[in-house]
Image (tube, rainbow, N blue to C red):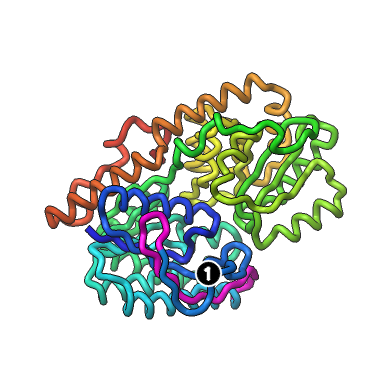
Amino acid sequence: MRIAFLTQYYPPELGAPQARLSELAAHFAARGHAVDVLTAMPNYPAGKVHPGYGGVFRRETVGGARVLRSFIYPTQRADFLHRLTNYFSFVVSSAVVGTAALPRPDYLLVESPPLFLGYAGVWLSRVKGARMIFNVSDLWPESAVSLGLVRRESRAYALSARLEAWCYRKAWLVTGQSAEILADVSRRFPAVPTYHLSNGCDTGAFHPGLARPGLFGEGPGAVVLYAGLHGLAQGLDQLLDAAERLRGAPARFVLVGEGPVKRDLVADAAARGVENVEFRDPVPKSEMPALVASADIVVVPLKKYIPGAVPSKLYEAMASARPVVLVAEGEAAGIVRRADAGIVVRPGDTDALAEAVRTLAADPALRRRLGENGRRAAVERYDRARIADRFIGHLEARLAGGAPAGAAAPAPAELPEPLSADA
């Protein structure tokens, strides 16, 4: 079969959707299927087009997939006008380039967010006669409400909710990366066929054997690592609050990455005189497994409860046998608790966050036990190769038999006994 991915984010950019989608595309290619990716000129999260890219259109091959890149207005600014321009510049350019240059696929997988990309997805699925798979990584506009970016009674919310419903109803299949996401979609749109395309990680790439002594220098105390986007949803100011409470404790925070709030975080840390926090530039994807494995503790924070959100960083830490301090509620918290892979803290409770770090920093045996539990759970339940194989097999069967999208879809209960709903 031939499958096409429509996504605003793709390598060489760093980030969760980039890694997840590129690995999925590679699995399709390895099974002998033709894979095309329609994406933007790489610019995220710095808001600048990467060197060697630019212009209106470009072709290349990445990991066995034929990649078509189209124009985008790059920006790191988070205000409404600039973000909207960023999103719609790619909506328009991808629709034009896709119409002209994308080979006809059997399936078109559209990544959301951004939700607006559904416009281009529906258009291209009609023009190309493809079955549209709408892949929901975050529930928008609900996540925007949770983060305080949109008010539920606003016109922007009403319009976004209408677009969300339209995308679901036009899709041949709606996939979601967490059980909470699918439960929400099924509750509101019971006629829409769904499939649990769980998040996870490459447990062969992320493992404890990659730890490199001295990677974080010779400073005193346990290394508490955050590696990823410095954005609004992560609430990284909570880490500064915890670090301030842990002055003199045997723990030092290392924040690795880039994003729209990093400059403010660096300035805030300097203004507070917090000396047990170090900021580092992002590292290439190839270096991330060693970075995670070399930490003593990995913190995975969210600013607030976001329905259905299960960060990829959680799975990577578990696969690396690192104990997790998870600042989140809902499904992500259930994964950590059932696996006994770390300590869960409610968003905003910085006293509990500081105490969790203090406890783990002072107890190497506890860190080792929680890390081993996490590794076991990641291998058994959240390995991306197994997740991809099930999904590819599902699409192969639907294409060969001409069956409806939801026919014989493997529900979570049919998978190996899960440690949480997100298996």
Looking at the image, how many numbered discs can be counted on the residues?
Answer: 1
Q: Quadrant of residue 232?
A: bottom right
Residue pictured at 44% horizontal, 70% vertical: 69
Is residue 17 shown to the viewer in this render? yes
User: Which structural element holds mark 1?
Assistant: loop
Q: Quadrant for the N terminus, please.
A: bottom left
Q: Position of residue 24 (x, y in %)?
A: 37, 51
User: Was residue 64 drawn as part of the magenta stretch in this picture?
Assistant: yes
Residue pictured at 36% horizontal, 66% vertical: 165
- Look at the picture and state if 154 lies above or below 370: below
User: Was residue 185 drawn as part of the magenta stretch in this picture?
Assistant: no
Range of the magenta residues? 61-80
* Residue linked to disc 1: 153
Amino acid on which the number 1 mark rests in the picture: Glu
**Left or right of residue 272, residue 346 in this image:** left
Is residue 303 shown to the viewer in this render? no
